[in-house]
Image: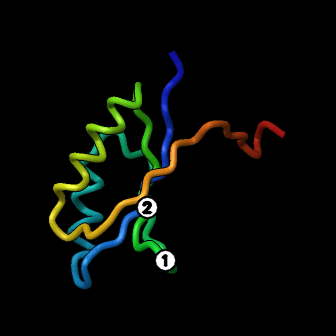
Amino acid sequence: MDKVNAYILINVKVGTTAHVFNELSKIDEATHISLTAGEFDIIVRVTVNSLEELFNLTEKIHKIDGIIKTVTHVVEKELSKTEI
């Protein structure tokens, strides 16, 4: 079975970015964690084995103190520039 990749876009409370970033770095399924400017404060790329695991992971992320809101986008198809 193929892995499920997703981007989780996160808004945090002012002053909690470093704490949230540190807590996200402890999550094994997180392959990339980016601090961003714009509508969202942090974007996390995750890889899991199923949508059920993605659900459980987002529930875990929601429990991190300082997170206000998340939006999850599941990757349906992806092409790496090295594949072109």
Q: Secondary structure at mark 1?
A: loop
Count of marks, rendered view: 2
| Residue behind mark 2 | 9
List x then y, in percent, for residue 64. Answer: 18, 59
Give the percent coordinates (x, y) of residue 13: 25, 78
Residue 48 occupies quadrant: top left
Comes first in the chain, label 1 or label 2 = 2
Q: Residue furthest top?
A: 1
Instruction: Say whether marks 1 and 2 touch (CB < 8 Å).
Output: yes
Q: Amino acid at mark 2?
A: Leu
Name of the residue lying farthest toward the right: 84
Give the CA separation, mark 1 to mark 2: 9 Å
Residue position for label 1: 39
Q: Which residue is located at x 44 percent, y 72 percent?
A: 40
Q: Secondary structure at mark 2?
A: strand
In the image, residue 81 above or below residue 54: below
For the rendered model, the colour scheme is rainbow
**In the rendered view, would you say 69 is above or below 77?**
below
Could you say which is closer to the camera, residue 19 or residue 39? 39
Horizontal and vertical percent position of residue 45: 46, 49
Q: Is residue 28 or residue 51 the one in the foreground?
A: 51
Q: Residue at x 25, y 66 (%)?
A: 20
Q: Is residue 30 left or right of residue 24?
A: right
Q: Quadrant of residue 34?
A: bottom left
31 w.r.t. 23: above or below: above
Q: Amino acid at mark 1?
A: Glu
Q: Quadrant of the C terminus?
A: top right
Residue 52 lies, in percent from the top left, at 34, 29
Image position of 57 with respect to 39: above or below: above
